[in-house]
Image: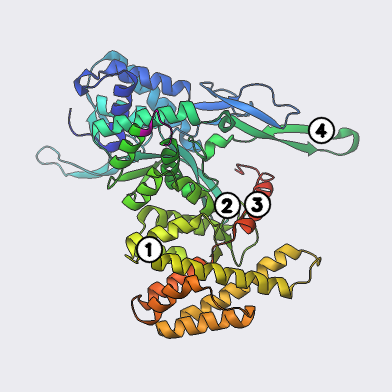
Amino acid sequence: MKELHPFSRYGLALILCENNLSEENKIDLDLIANQIELGLSEFRMKPANSYEGKEKVKFQYSQEEKGIKEKGGFLSPHVITTFKNERHILNAANEMLLACRKGVNKEVPFKTSFSPTCNEFTSFNIPPKNKEPSIGRGLPKGELIEAGLSTVSTLTHIKPCLQYRIDKKGMPEMYNCCIIPELSLDALINFIKLFKKLLVTKSSNELFIGDVTPKESGKGQNATITYEPKRPLLYRGNFPNPPRSSALGSIALLGAIGEFGKEAEVSELAQKVLDSLKGATIYMIKYGDAKTFTYNHHVIDLAKEGNLRKIVDAVYYSKLYNQDRRTSTNTEYQKFDLFSSHFLQFFNAPAFQDFLAFRVEYPNDVELLLKTYFIKMENIKPEIVTSARNLGKWLNSVAYHTAKREIKEGSPNYHEKIREQKAKVLIELESAAFAAKSGDALIAQVVTRAGRLSGMDAPNEADLFMEASMNGELKLAQAQNMIIAFSRLKSYKAQESSQSTQVENEEKEELDIV
């Protein structure tokens, strides 16, 4: 078999895995047809039982076509198409199923319906003599077996996937997308084996539970209540601890694999899979489009150590200084999530600067991420990084106690006002750091200002960082970045209170709003 596109190769690896095969030449059209048939049986999701008068309802896969929306059903999140185009993939998949059952491999046009990254292109028709050539639109062509494998990849639920949210002109649009690594066939089979185990053992039944929203219409005696089920948690991601923000989906998957790797029975396989992802091209594919990226090997190491998942959660619970609480429609948080995801994927200096550009207070678990970046990517001595962390912790404490002195206890919105005032102090300290023209000036301006606000000296544990900043061992930009980044880390107590409130607020919002 010729070299396949990574999307089709995923279908090949899946069939080999599902049928306990190891040789490509054992794949035939009948095996492909069987897998397409299974994918069609899971094309949609619908409530498993009545949801009238209920607060929540469990969903199940369904092959029903007629009246599925009226029954509270949705297109399954793993089918790589759009609501408007689902009929095209249904028709194409059924045609592919019939063609594969006939068992004759032949050349066929590739369509976006079953090959999401494929599209029409300009084609040139070479005519017989004495006739003018024509230019039109054409589709690429390939063997039926490859088209069938692409259809398998489009339909199967055994791939990492989620609904990705994009806001256009203030209106949200949701896209089913999947994450496909470009790996050797053997490595891809290992990836699928691990992901299947992840689905079976760690994907909680809660992923299939959706909220039910009552809607009242009419008034008085004519008032009626109807109930509308919302998409289950599965649409945020079909793996454990799916991200609350779709922009963090690709990195959340890596964290879930790393967390799963703690289990003794899959530890060796998980470590092997994570190692195979180092340097591999990763495709994030939605209908009509694909984006590629690679995971930085230091970030993969964080996953292998089982630390990445809590870092991803912590990034999500970060609090922008100039914004109220996070909501599903707050575009500033959506931008922050996007640049945070870029930083966690690429883990380089430009991505870090974009991440740092958002003025935000981080939960304490972001500390490990920052330390790893400064030590591994900036090559700064660990003891200097730890010393900088101690200075940052002191600066954050100074901002909190300064804010607490200025806000009268018991006043309306007391805690929110403290947060706002604390943010102002931290911004003031950051501005002083940015304005410094030398290492000496940096320490003098920031530490002196903080000392005046608090009436306290900087901790002795910060001395090593301050000396390295003043004697030139650290570049000015490095010292500035470390002061700013570490001063944004919350205390554990503040973090727990903030996250608890945020979760409670978010649970009042609907998962899907389109």
**Three-letter code for the amino acid on which mark 1 is drawn:** Pro
**Contact, CB < 8 Å: mark 2 with mark 3?**
no
Q: Which residue is mark 4?
A: 224
Q: Which residue is mark 2?
A: 171
Instruction: Between residue 494 and residue 359, name the one nearer to us.
Output: 494
**Three-letter code for the amino acid on which mark 3 is drawn:** Gln
Crowd band around label 4 with a 10 angstrom C-alpha radius: few (<14), some (14–19), many (20+): few
Dot 4 or dot 2, earlier in sequence: 2
**Contact, CB < 8 Å: mark 4 with mark 1?**
no
**Contact, CB < 8 Å: mark 3 with mark 4?**
no
In three-dimensional space, the C-alpha distance between marks 4 and 2, rounded to whole angstroms, equals 29 Å
In three-dimensional space, the C-alpha distance between marks 2 and 3, rounded to whole angstroms, equals 23 Å
In three-dimensional space, the C-alpha distance between marks 3 and 4, rounded to whole angstroms, equals 33 Å
Crowd band around label 2 with a 10 angstrom C-alpha radius: few (<14), some (14–19), many (20+): few
Q: Secondary structure at mark 3?
A: helix
Q: Secondary structure at mark 2?
A: strand
Crowd band around label 1 with a 10 angstrom C-alpha radius: few (<14), some (14–19), many (20+): some
In the image, which is nearer the foreground, mark 3 or mark 1?
Answer: 1
What residue is shown at x 31% (from left), y 20% (from top)?
Answer: 32
Q: Which residue is mark 1?
A: 382
Q: Position of residue 100 (x, y in %)?
A: 30, 18
What residue is shown at x 66% (from left), y 28% (from top)?
Answer: 57
Q: Which residue is mark 3?
A: 502
Give the left or right position of residue 323, taking residue 375 as reference. Answer: right
| Quarter of the figure with the N terminus | top left
Give the left or right position of residue 126, taking residue 271 as reference. Answer: left
Residue ranking furthest to the right: 221
Quarter occupied by residue 106: top left
Magenta segment main secondary structure: loop
> Which region of the structure is painted magenta?
262-267
